[in-house]
Amino acid sequence: MSSAARAGVMRRFTRHHLALFGGVTVVLLCLSALLAPAIAPRDPLLLDTSVRFLLPFASWTFPLGTDELGRDTLSRLLYGGQISLTVGLVAMATTVVTGSVIGLLAGYLGGWTDTLLMRFVDTMLCFPQVFLLLVVAAFIPPTLISISLIIGLTSWMEVARIVRSEILHLKEQDFIQAARALGAGKTRIMFQELLPNIVAPLLVAATLKVAAAVLMESYISYLGYGVQPPLASWGNMLTNAQGYFDTVPWLAILPGVMITLTVMGFNFLGDGLRDALDPRLRMESRPANAPTLRTRRLACLEQNDSASRAGKRWLVAWRRR
């Protein structure tokens, strides 16, 4: 990408205010998770039943209060962010790698390979992802890596479809024909010629998949199949708080807010990257001759003016009678 193209991408991205909000939110969340050992006021596993259910901001020692076992809520949120974001990133990497390989093979090889792989994708899409997660999780011990891999291996289908559609368009381009003429093999063409040219849609899909994975980890943790205590994740913090929601609602509200901010941040960031990296999407969604707001206003004014002149002519003619 040339310097002018990079400048154009940055200009379009910075004009997308929600994308900027999402980017700042994601950076702050990642920094807070990385720096959790340095900024967390207490050990997130330390129990102190003498200070159970402290209100937020009631004590400098416990800025966001304590839970049912006297554990510091702020520390658990920070360390829970490490777990939830790690699950999201590992699941995203698994999703992108699996979907890219299957999409590359289906799009470039075509024929029975394409048919077989796409029918497998369609079959996987027939089942709700939560159902697949629960079925697989019932047979695999719920560790951090296993949960991440399970989420990633049940959510790659959309990425495979995106990659396949891009490959079907690119494989007939002149530079691919030239690579074939020079004797390049299929593996080299797929991974050295085609794959670098679909980085933009993959980057957008990756950001959206992080948000989906964090949300999915919260689902299965809430159902009891996710990250197990004593480790803290935002999902199992919600699970632990459900029995106390009527009396101490902040125990559920705080991890819920963190999940919401994470999902919104990555989704806004993905939308901004999509618009910045491929501005054709915005142009193609509106026909070239579609009226803008200014032209619609001018047309409306002209119609009102012509109607007013016609009314005046009718009134003059009626008076002459």
Image (cartoon, helix red, strand yellow):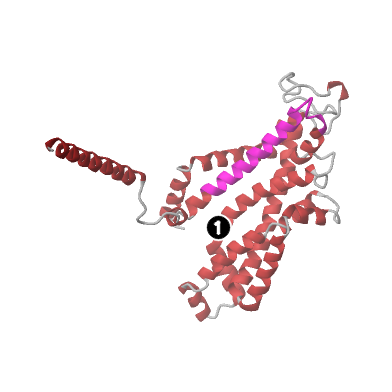
- Give the residue drawn at x 71%, y 21%: 57
- Give the residue drawn at x 80%, y 44%: 223
| Magenta region | 243-272
State the residue in front, 187 or 254: 254
Q: Is residue 214 above or below residue 253?
A: below
Does residue 263 belong to the magenta stretch?
A: yes
- Residue 77: percent from left, percent from top: 73, 34
Q: Residues within 10 Å of mark 1 (few under 14, many from 20)?
A: some
State the residue in front, 67 or 131: 131
Q: What's the amino acid at mark 1?
A: Pro
Residue 306 in sight: yes
Left or right: residue 112 compared with residue 218: left
In the rendered image, which residue does mark 1 sit on?
A: 201
Does residue 143 belong to the magenta stretch?
A: no
Q: Is residue 162 above or below residue 276?
A: below
Residue 37 in sight: no
